[in-house]
């Protein structure tokens, strides 16, 4: 019996998707008081700030620094960058978030910083406003 190429490719694609999502589905946890599932990517204290990330849309996690959102952008090379330090790409969301926290120092992440890369006191690396 000869299997048409289209059927073989669909089957291969289905198996690949199932293999990659199976591990992610196993890590899904429901947050207390919420019906919506979320996957915790990381949750730690770093540089005096609490950094957290949960799985987000399009493979880019939703990152919080001290409870305020930090926008991550996915680059064509597979890395990540933030508005705080948009001159450097980092291999993982955690590395990008830690670099943003290093840039912040002791300054809090403001609602403007999350969107525009601005934080009190400026930046020694020349992040412009």
Image (tube, rainbow, N blue to C red):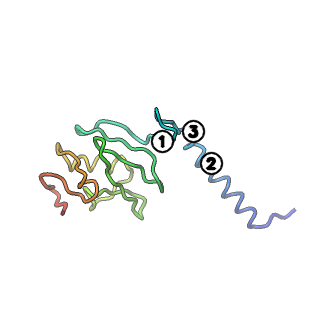
Say which quadrant the C terminus sits in. bottom left
Frontmost of labels 3 and 2 is 3
Q: What secondary structure is found at the residue carrying circle 2?
A: helix
Residue 104 lies left or right of residue 53; in this view the side is left
| Residue at the extreme top of the image, as rendered | 32
Query: Which of the pair 42/67 is nearer the observer?
Result: 67
Q: Position of residue 56 (x, y in %)?
A: 45, 50
Residue 26 got which mark?
Answer: 3
Residue 44 lies left or right of residue 84; in this view the side is right
Q: Position of residue 108 (x, y in %)?
A: 20, 45
Q: Earlier in the sequence, mark 3 or mark 1?
A: 3
Which residue is located at x 55 percent, y 44 percent? 24
Which residue is located at x 29 percent, y 38 percent? 50
Q: Which residue is mark 2?
A: 19
Q: Residues within 10 Å of mark 1 (few under 14, many from 20)?
A: some
Q: Which residue is mark 1?
A: 39
């Amino acid at each position: 019996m000869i299997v048409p190429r289209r059927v073989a490719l669909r089957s291969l694609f289905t198996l690949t998707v199932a293999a990659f999502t199976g591990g992610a589905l196993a890590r899904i946890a429901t947050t207390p008081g919420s019906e919506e599932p979320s996957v915790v990517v990381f949750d730690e204290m770093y540089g005096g700030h609490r950094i957290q990330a949960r799985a987000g849309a399009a493979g880019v996690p939703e990152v919080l620094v001290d409870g305020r959102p930090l926008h991550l952008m996915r680059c064509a090379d597979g890395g990540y960058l933030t508005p705080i330090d948009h001159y450097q790409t980092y291999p993982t969301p955690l590395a990008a978030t830690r670099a943003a926290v290093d840039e912040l120092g002791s300054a809090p992440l403001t609602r403007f910083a999350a969107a525009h890369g601005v934080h009190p006191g400026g930046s020694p690396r020349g992040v412009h406003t």
